[in-house]
Image (spheres, rainbow, N blue to C red):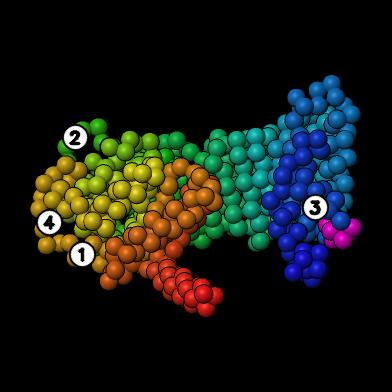
Amino acid sequence: MNISNLPTELLLQILKEAARNPGWDEATHSPAGRRVLSAVCFRWRDIVLNTAEIWSLVRVHLEKTRYSGKESTFEKALAALELDLSRTRSQLLDVYWNSRLDLAHAKRVFQVVMERAPFCRWRSLEIYNDSWDSYSLHAIRSEERFYNLESLRVRWCQVNGFLPLINRTVSSNFRFFYDKDSILATKLYESDMNNIISRTTELTLPDFGHNPIPPLPPHNTRLSVCSVNLREASHVQHLKVRSPLSISQFVDHKWSSLVSLDVWFTKPRSSRPLQQQLVLLPRLQTLIVSGGYFEPILNISTPPLDRLRLERGHENVKGANSSLSNTLSHPSFSLISTKKLEISFPLLPAVLTTVIIHFSSIGSLGLGLDNSYDGWELVRHVICEKRYLGEAGGAGGTTSVAGLEDIFLAQIETLELQMSWNNGGIALKDTWKAYMARIFDDTRGKQLAMIRCSWPNGAIRQLTRSDLEESRMKDETDGMKQEEEEASAL
């Protein structure tokens, strides 16, 4: 079907999706995608210009340095912004605000925005690298309200004077607050943020230093924080800790509801073995440990995990391998019943062998690889040819595991290879298919059903055993037909 013959409803959905991920027009500081789409043909132009939802993503990106001594350039950008806002009609808006202007220019921008897109129509707001305090109180009318605001993101800016207005006027629609980088005092959160916090279910909070995190209501179940200096933790279900911390900081709280934990552990200053009280996580399903230091896992008591992901962070590959090997070889290691294991960094052959032996019941295994040759050889040697069995048990140990060959890939159904370099292009497609086919051939009689290779640029190559068999049967059938045709021609 030619794209010009698509039904209007389907074409509209395609254009909406394209407009939500636009390019950037440096001349007007407005998403260029919508203007490009409207210039394709009369039909597209009519749809784009008359569909308010396509214009609901509003970007206010204005900088003082760009318009210094160039008033006409500012006027052009302001006119383009006003035109974009007029096309939104009564649509709810998603606003991205990154504006660094002097007071006079800032007032004019606010005036245009509030006339064309009052705050009551804002569905989401992201403020980046801006200071609304310098002009917001001069431009905002007292009757402005954020009745429909659902999410607020604050990045690298101070909005102390503006937050109270949002705090006073948000409604029950508000769900998400993200403040990763601003520097706001705990007392401010307790006073000027109380209504916002009371309505959110997902919070990303800045670093409060040694001060405790403000009291959080029970429905704040998703937290991203820099410390676990919480007054109450029993209601938290999903926790991400963005700064390194000691496992001992978890001991003082009851984590009775925690389902997923993303944490970065610090190494102790002394080299003595860990002797900490166990951290009980009775409902944990997902554990992500970053930083390349994994020994604190030994002090965590959980039921069998659905997912365990290990990342090296800033630790070198050798150090991360050593830490993982020490953790697995410890008698108290208890996470062997994990269903899905992901290791984002390259493993030494002996360590990979030890991983597969200890996690013999996992259904999905993900491995990080540094470069194509080493990655291919490592997986082929360890998984397919079962080399290094005599070295398993440590990064350089010689513990014999003769007789354990049958446990390799005994339960694994999915093998994921995560590359750290970008895909070289479509030319590699047949190469990777042949590589994955070889692994399937070397693991006949095992549970392995799918292999997936992924690259940082988003490229994915995957192959299932059933697709491979079907493809080979088709090739065989086609070959037989070709031979019959050639024989008939003779």
Which residue is identified by label 3?
37
Tell which tag, 3 or 2, sits nearer the viewer: 3
Q: CA distance from mark 3 to mark 4?
A: 63 Å
Which residue is identified by label 4?
401
The part of the chain drawn in magenta is: 42-48
> Three-letter amino acid code at disc 3?
Leu
> Three-letter amino acid code at disc 1?
Ile
**Labelled pair 1, 2 in contact (Cβ < 8 Å):** no
- Give the left or right position of residue 191, taking residue 61 as reference: left
- The vertical placement of 320 against 38, above or below, is above
Q: CA distance from mark 4 to mark 1?
A: 11 Å
Which residue is identified by label 2?
271
Circle 4 sits in a helix, a strand or a loop, which is it?
Answer: loop
Q: Is any atom of residue 425 visible in this view?
A: yes
Which residue is identified by label 1?
407
How far across and down, in percent of the image, does residue 115 sit?
87, 47
> Three-letter amino acid code at disc 4?
Val
Dot placed on the residue nearer the N-terminal end, 4 or 1 = 4
- Give the left or right position of residue 156, taking residue 413 as reference: right
Residue closest to the eye, 320 or 460 = 460
